[in-house]
Amino acid sequence: MREEQKKTIKERYEQSLQKGERFWPDSIFKDVLMALAIFVLLLMLATFVGVPVEPKADPSDSSYVPRPEWYFLFLFKFLALYGQIPLLGKVEWLATVLIPVIYLGALTLLPFIDRSPNRYYGKRVFAIGIMAIMVTSMVSLTFISDVPTTSTDAVYLPGLLQTLGGLVVPLAGYFLLALMNFAFKKAPAKAMIWTTAVTVLLMIGLTAGTVALAPILETVEVEVADTLEEQIVAGQDLYSVHCVECHGDDGSVTVIEGVEGLEGTQVMAINGRDVLYTLNDDSMAEVIAYGRPDAGMNPFGRAYNPEGLTKSEIDYIVIFMRYAWDDRYEMPPMEPLFPALAEGEAPSYEVHIAPIVKRYCVSCHRAGKDNLNYLMTTYEEVLTSGDHADQNIIAGDPQSFLLLTIQEQTIPDPETGEEMIGVMPPKKALSADIVDVFLRWIMNGMPETAGEAGALSTMPAATATP
Amino acid sequence: MWKKLYAWLDERLGLNDLYKATLDRPEPKGNWWNTLGSASLFLFLLQGATGIFLAVYYTPSPDHAYDSIQYIMTGVQFGWLIRGIHHWGASLMVMVVFIHMLRVFITASYKYPRELTWLVGIGLLLATLGMGFTGYLLPWNQKSFWATTVGTQIAGSVPFIGEFILKALRGGTDLSALTLQRFFAAHIWMLPAVLAGLVGVHLFLIIKHGESQFPARED
Amino acid sequence: MPGPHHISRRDFVKLTTVAVGAAIGAVIGVPSVAFLISPALRAGSKDAWAPIGNLEDIPVGEPFAFSFTRTQVNGWERTATNFGGFVLRKSEDPADILILSSRCTHLACQVSWQAESRVYVCPCHDAAFDVEGNVLDGPPPRPLDVYDEFQVDEGGNLLIHVKEG
């Protein structure tokens, strides 16, 4: 830059200072107001939106789909799109290292690349155009980062739109602008502005199209237990499903009965001090994860069994065992398993039956266990599955098999007279209030939702019928 | 009486000279776009303050990191607020710093004599992204763990020295307690030191050259 | 008055200060850098045979997922790193087995088997591999890694040879 240009710049700056304001208090006033606005915004976000709860890191659960923080999503999507390019797309370091380094390098050395003294927007259409396309590209890549790049379908329109909007159109835009700026030196600013505008609008359109046509992905809902009470309940539910068979619902079993292949096997009572005082939480978690193969216990952890429990789930089971059976820990006040029924109130599946079934029935009545094919993990299964589906649950009928078996009556085979279905649950009878819930539920026609049950309830205090 | 106190301090601290040098300066006519720089600084200080308070309860070990944060959220008075501000403040800072850079680009304020200010600014941008990346691992939840696994894998894709970079970042071949520990050290000491130093230089240059004016047709 | 071979006092002092500063910098700096990158200079773990399942439990013709852990000492902590893969029994012959690693060859995310479309899919950048691990689509530069050294012991357990992590 020539000395006279520098002089001009300095003079123009001096002039602008004359016509300007004071740093204190004018600039600082605006700065403080902005700081206040930001602070209030953060307070609102922290209070009303909060921080999303994620499950604990589980190095053994590699089925998790990794995603970077939002400000890196554009890079993440760019890598996926880049991988679609034939040949070049296989050289990953071009996309992970070379291209970002080139961009960053250009950005860093900008004052040395762009040495002209022009500052006015109208004289810098090329630079501003390139930046506009780049920023639009980063934003649009962020928005489409969740849309799969490819699909097993033959024609995958969102994939095509992504490639166009993410790679082809911006590249074309850069190329055209460069052409106009360097080849046709006197290209009118208007042409370059139009090129930029069309490129940006096309990219926005293609992004919107991609998002609109994106296939709806199945998301697996993972429940994260946040408080101690939630963790104990989660642990108890998991224990009731996976562990009760061998260890009993109170952990006191010392000889296994009724489990195929392990009949008569001796085990330590896991609710006793011999186990609880000598094993710390990590050891207990390892026992659950790895199992005790020599003694007959399968691995339950995902590190050793791909279909197994996650680290968080094992942690919840250990927490439950600690607070339920270790006398050094005091169980916090817990909510009851289901809300007590008022006089005349009809129970519903979702509020009353589901937690009861999860706690007491599902450990046997799930796929892969010996249960005459009667599964109880969903509403439909409870009503319609099993070898005796037509007799298990009949609305309004107290002779339904389910009701008989939970009231300690066995069901004989009509032809041979031998016991076909035994008393349920086989080891320990349900308490009277739980039996009452089932009775009321089946008598009222097995409503599924709380709303349906509410409509059926007959409350003693008269709601005067209109 | 306050006047006497002020005079006493002024003789020893040079308050008046400080005032003339830093505060009592003319600036070109500015608008709200000019607040982005100080907003970035404000966010940095806010993150630093909330971060220091979080460090009173947080443990950087895989055994305790997650639980210590759960304790902060549910067991510490206003812990949820401090952590919430820190969490959202991080995202906001990345956004504000980036928009600030865009503004400087569009008004071409990086040109003579402010080229060094721009260079330092890019350093600040990279350090901010580094803070985000290192801070992101600290909760040690599924998102953190796997995002860092992929992130360090990307660093490892550099030709020739990639393997070395990956091992240096992770403290070994896989993510472990060493990874969490060094990311924590980087997040609370090394990168903040770099940021503070660069911010100092950035502010010095801004005071020296003054805020640039919005370009007019003749510029 | 400095002569042709004489150095002025001021220059001497400047030179010595810089030299001493550089020496201090080196003595602090070199160990510091080594301190920071020390884990990167260590060699990896040794190899081992890892059991991944019993042949009886592995069906023929369909990829069967397995996982195992290797424990490495990282610093002061024993870290159990989890590895996974898929076993494909192509026929009843116990030697006719293809064992693939589940680590995507692009950037090391874990692939999962999609039974309906018969492809391994990587969730990170949408890579796809066929049942033998060859790349069908996406950025991976090479097919899935194969555990080619395996053996079956007397009890029918399948073991794979795992080399340095």
Image: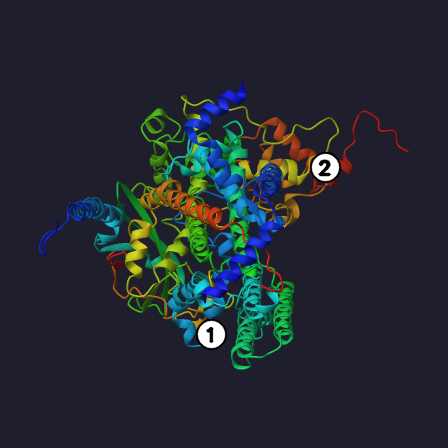
Compared across the picture, whether A258 is left or right of A49 comes to left
The percent coordinates of residue B135 (x first, y second) are 43, 45
Q: Residue at x 8, y 55 (%)?
A: C5
Q: Quadrant of the N terminus of chain A?
A: bottom left
Residue B205, position in %: x, y?
45, 49
Q: Which mark is residue A212?
A: none
Instruction: Provide the residue designation for mark 2.
Output: A443
Q: Report whether residue A378 is seen.
A: yes
Label 2 marks a residue whose chain is: A
| SS of the residue under disc 1 | loop
Amino acid type shown at disc 1: Ile
Nearest the viewer among B43 and C108 is B43
Outermost residue toward the right in this view: A466
Q: Quadrant of the C terminus of chain A?
A: top right
Q: At numbered mark 2, what does the secondary structure look like: helix, strand or loop?
A: helix
Horizontal and vertical percent position of residue B192: 40, 43
